[in-house]
């Protein structure tokens, strides 16, 4: 399928990023959170964000941070995380991303770039073709689609998009049938029937353990440390974290942070 110049740029950037991060182009990303934080050096905070918010990319004092909505499915969190990494690698400005944007329902070229980056980063075209070769090029029905999705740790709708973009899924009637099944949510039943194990990575571990909020050390050592030391109040902390006061109050309570004293009169 024809691709615009800005989408081609994003795909090329994703391939370069995978090479620089030691991933190559022929395999899934087995632990995206580890890659983003330890290899790409971008701290990730996982919080209970507002309804309709998938994630955010924030830059403060030349340090980038990524925020994820921990209430969403792990496959969605993985795609959102790759989307936010795309903003980072493509040099985009700070942004808060809604779920519709991450699902691809956007005409914003910047967001289209971030989505194209995420798709190629998580499921490179070469790796998709390798999967098809290894499985003797099966007819892509719903069962095959969910198996591909599970292999790459992405959702079935995201796998459908990748197969279309890689021109593996070409027949219009086949596309329409799969799209109808996805819209009806039939992929969830197929996943259960096939007993496909969900991706097992640090994002899954955080969700399973109920370990929210999950805050990176550098973020804790920044605004949260200032709050704990009595240097800023809860409103300034909420402003620094780009979250509403109620969310920040919940974070502070769950962490057990008690300010050392009142905010100084500067």
Image (tube, rainbow, N blue to C red):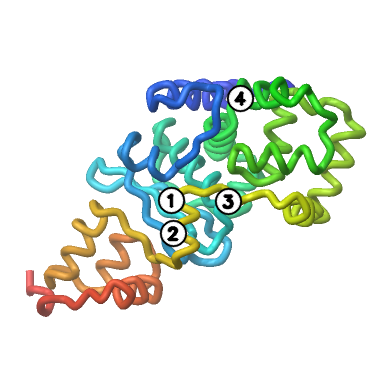
Query: Badge 2: how crowded within 10 Å, few (<14), some, or many (20+)?
Result: some
Q: Quadrant of residue 125?
A: top right
Mark 3 or mark 2: whose residue is earlier in sequence: 3
197 displayed left or right of 90? right
Mark 4 or mark 2: whose residue is earlier in sequence: 4
Q: CA distance from mark 3 to mark 4?
A: 20 Å
Q: CA distance from mark 1 to mark 4?
A: 22 Å
Evaluate if marks 3 and 4 touch, with contact meaning CB atoms under 8 Å apart: no
The circle drawn on residue 127 is 4
In the image, what residue occupies the spot 25% across and 54% down?
217
Secondary structure state at the residue bearing disc 3:
helix
Q: CA distance from mark 3 to mark 1?
A: 14 Å
Q: Nearer the viewer, residue 253 or 61?
A: 253
Evaluate if marks 1 and 4 touch, with contact meaning CB atoms under 8 Å apart: no
The circle drawn on residue 206 is 2
The circle drawn on residue 202 is 1
The percent position of residue 184, horizontal first and vertical second, equals 83, 55
Q: CA distance from mark 3 to mark 2?
A: 14 Å
Q: Name the residue that disc number 3 marks.
A: 76
Q: Nearer the viewer, residue 156 or 47?
A: 156
In the image, what residue occupies the spot 75% across and 39% down?
145
Q: CA distance from mark 2 to mark 1?
A: 6 Å
Evaluate if marks 2 and 1 touch, with contact meaning CB atoms under 8 Å apart: yes
The percent position of residue 189, horizontal first and vertical second, equals 78, 56
């Amino acid at each position: 399928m024809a691709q615009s110049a800005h989408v081609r740029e994003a795909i090329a950037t994703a391939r370069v990023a995978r090479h620089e991060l030691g991933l190559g182009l022929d395999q899934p990303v087995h632990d995206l959170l580890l890659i983003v934080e330890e290899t790409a050096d971008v701290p990730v905070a996982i919080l209970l964000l507002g309804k309709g918010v998938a994630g955010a990319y924030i830059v403060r004092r030349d340090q980038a941070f990524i925020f994820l909505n921990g209430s969403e499915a792990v496959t969605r969190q993985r795609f959102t995380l790759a989307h936010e990494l795309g903003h980072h690698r493509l040099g985009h400005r700070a942004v808060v991303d809604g779920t519709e944007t991450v699902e691809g329902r956007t005409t914003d070229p910047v967001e289209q770039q971030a989505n194209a980056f995420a798709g190629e980063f998580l499921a490179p075209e070469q790796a998709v073709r390798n999967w098809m070769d290894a499985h003797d090029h099966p007819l892509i029905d719903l069962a095959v689609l969910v198996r591909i999705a599970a292999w790459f740790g992405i959702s079935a709708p995201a796998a459908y998009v990748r197969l279309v973009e890689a021109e593996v899924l070409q027949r219009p009637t086949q596309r329409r049938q799969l799209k109808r099944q996805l819209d009806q949510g039939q992929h969830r039943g197929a996943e259960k029937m096939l007993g496909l194990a969900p991706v097992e990575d640090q994002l899954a571990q955080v969700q399973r353990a109920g370990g929210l909020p999950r805050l990176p050390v550098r973020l804790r050592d920044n605004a949260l440390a200032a709050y704990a030391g009595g240097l800023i109040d809860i409103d300034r902390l909420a402003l620094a974290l780009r979250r509403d006061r109620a969310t920040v109050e919940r974070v502070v309570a769950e962490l057990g942070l008690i300010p050392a004293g009142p905010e100084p009169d500067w």
